[in-house]
Image (spheres, grey):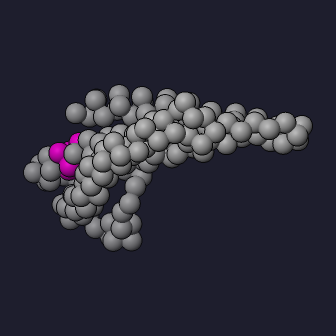
């Protein structure tokens, strides 16, 4: 599972880098267009929606790297099995959120799939909204991987960092 999680993270990192690059390029185009007083209406939609994708992909990557929500002040005082048990509790709490995020993300994506972008009517909003269930599903997968690793470590008497 760990190798699959790492491969998925690499794909998300590349996609996130592409999304943030598109964001930066379109912002530069917007700045230049305003300076030259040439309207470029599509750049606003593209920049906002590519930024949304970059943020959601980055959030999933953060979950895989254990750079997410945690009670650091408590965790820093725990040792051994207690630290691992605390990690399991955090993962379970996050799983509740990511499963709901996945389920409702799918519902929202279905509902708004055929809505159109404001400045590019031929593009569908579904391509923006689908970032939500994709992120939720990959976060859930990463968290399940962490959960198995933590439970295995707890059984072995070790500690998961």
Looking at the image, the residue that sits furthest to the right is: 36
Residue positioned 40% across, 39% down in the render: 113
140 is higher (above) or lower (below) than 46? below
Q: Which residues are magenta?
A: 145-150
Quadrant of the rendered image containing residue 12 = top left
Specify whether residue 150 is in view. yes
76 is higher (above) or lower (below) than 37? below
Quadrant of the rendered image containing residue 148 = top left
Say how many tags the image has: 0
For residue 99, side relative to residue 30 (left or right): left
Residue positioned 30% across, 48% down in the render: 107
Residue positioned 38% across, 60% down in the render: 69
Specify whether residue 57 is in view. no
42 is higher (above) or lower (below) than 112? above
Q: Position of residue 98 (x, y in %)?
A: 29, 52
Q: Position of residue 29 (x, y in %)?
A: 76, 35
Seen from the viewer's position, the closer of residues 42 and 75 is 42
Quadrant of the rendered image containing residue 121 = top right
Q: Position of residue 27 (x, y in %)?
A: 72, 40
For residue 35, side relative to residue 95 (left or right): right
């Amino acid at each position: 599972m760990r190798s699959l999680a790492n491969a998925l993270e690499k794909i998300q990192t590349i996609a996130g880098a592409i999304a943030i690059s598109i964001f930066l390029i379109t912002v530069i185009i917007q700045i230049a267009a305003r300076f030259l007083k040439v309207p470029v209406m599509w750049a606003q939609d593209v920049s906002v929606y590519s930024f949304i994708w970059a943020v959601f992909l980055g959030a999933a990557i953060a979950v895989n790297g254990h750079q997410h929500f945690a009670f650091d002040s408590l965790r820093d005082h725990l040792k051994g099995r207690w630290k691992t048990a605390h990690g399991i509790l955090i993962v379970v709490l996050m799983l509740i959120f990511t499963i709901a995020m996945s389920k409702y993300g799918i519902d929202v994506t279905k509902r708004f799939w055929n809505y159109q972008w404001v400045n590019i009517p031929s593009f569908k909003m579904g391509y923006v909204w689908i970032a939500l269930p994709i992120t939720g599903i990959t976060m859930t997968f990463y968290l399940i991987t962490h959960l198995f690793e933590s439970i295995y470590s707890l059984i072995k008497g070790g500690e998961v960092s």
